[in-house]
Amino acid sequence: MSARVTVREAEVDDGLADLGLLDDGERARAERKRDPAPFVTGHALVRRTLGELLDRDPAGLTFERRCTTCRSELHGKPSLVDVPGWHFSLSYTSALAVVVAAEGIDVGVDTEDLTDADFEGFADVTLAREEVAAFEGLTGRDLLIARARVWARKEAILKATGHGLVVDPSEILVTGPLEAPGLVAWRAEEPAPPAVSLVDLDLTTANHRAAVAGLTDQPLEIVGG
Ligand SMILES: CC(C)(COP(=O)(O)OP(=O)(O)OC[C@H]1O[C@@H](n2cnc3c(N)ncnc32)[C@H](O)[C@@H]1OP(=O)(O)O)[C@@H](O)C(=O)NCCC(=O)NCCS
């Protein structure tokens, strides 16, 4: 048995052609962004993906959010209002949006632009002490790929659980960048999910890496990614 996860990606459209697909709240959030294009592309991709899977009008879908930490309904992991059992996750950079959706399992996706992994102190922010060795000897683009891959794995897990970066990613240990993806240890105070399946996504964009996590002990079957 495997758990089916649908994946869609889209290059950010600077023309904002999909603005009309968003609801009033999303449009208001878009207007507050210095560059609204990634937000508009991402949220339109969520609507298109779920509209297609559920055979619903993408513009008619409604969403709510709930923070797992403070229970606020103003931020936190988003979900569909009237479609129980379906889960999705969105990640976007200035160039690319990625959406995953699945029935029956919590999912999280994260995508990272390699250039965003190019900063000193990456290990301090992201890695547990014993994860550092796997990066030794890597330089240049190989190092950035390794960082983006591991960062995406950790953040995908934390988006599947709904914690986001409230949990310190250095407390979530994953396999090394040259190994198959997997959760190695959960050291955060917050309760660990009972099971995590992790997959690195093959994107069409060479300058990004991405991972998807599902809170299940079944392997993930990636469809359309
Ligand atoms: C969620 C988070 C990990 C996203 O990180 P990012 O790399 O900047 O952004 P990504 O593009 O990968 O993901 C953004 C999308 O993740 C989703 N998201 C937001 N919070 C989420 C959460 N807690 N869990 C899962 N998904 C979440 C939303 O769809 C969001 O898009 P939007 O902001 O346009 O609505 C990060 O912003 C975070 O941890 N925020 C939590 C901060 C917080 O909640 N603080 C208060 C606690 S009381």
Image (spheres, rainbow, N blue to C red):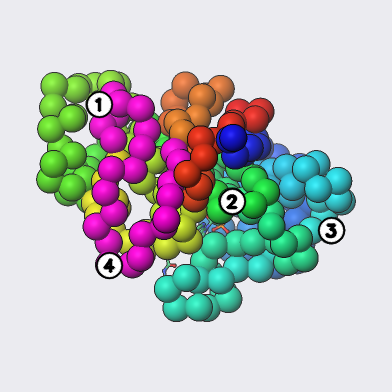
Q: Which residues are magenta?
A: 175-198
What is the three-letter code of the residue carrying label 2?
Answer: Ile
- State how far apart marks 3 and 1 are (Cα): 43 Å
Q: Main secondary structure of the magenta part?
A: loop
Does residue 195 show up magenta in the picture? yes
The quarter of the picture where the N terminus appears is top right
Q: As displayed, is residue 186 above or below residue 67?
A: above
Q: Secondary structure at mark 4?
A: loop
The answer to which of 165 and 35 lies nearer the viewer is 165
As drawn, is 160 to the left or to the right of 87? Answer: left
- Residue for badge 4: 189
> Is the residue indicated by label 2 positioned so its CB lies within 8 Å of ligand 1?
no
Counting residues from the start of the chain, the first of labels 1 and 2 encountered is 2
Counting residues from the start of the chain, the first of labels 3 and 1 encountered is 3
The quarter of the picture where the C terminus appears is top right
As drawn, is 56 to the left or to the right of 69? Answer: right
Q: What crowding class fits label 2: few (fewer than 14 Cα within 10 Å), some (14-19), or many (20 or more)?
A: some
- State how far apart marks 1 and 4 are (Cα): 30 Å
Q: Secondary structure at mark 2?
A: loop
Of tags 1 and 4, the one toward the viewer is 4
- State how far apart marks 4 and 3 are (Cα): 39 Å
What is the three-letter code of the residue carrying label 3?
Answer: Gly
Counting residues from the start of the chain, the first of labels 4 and 3 encountered is 3
Q: As displayed, is residue 73 above or below residue 37?
A: below
Q: Which mark is residue 206?
A: none
Does residue 65 show up magenta in the picture? no
What is the three-letter code of the residue carrying label 4?
Answer: Glu
Q: What crowding class fits label 3: few (fewer than 14 Cα within 10 Å), some (14-19), or many (20 or more)?
A: few
- Residue for badge 2: 105
Residue 85 on image: x %, y %? 69, 57
- Residue for badge 3: 60
Q: Are marks 1 and 2 in contact (CB under 8 Å)?
A: no
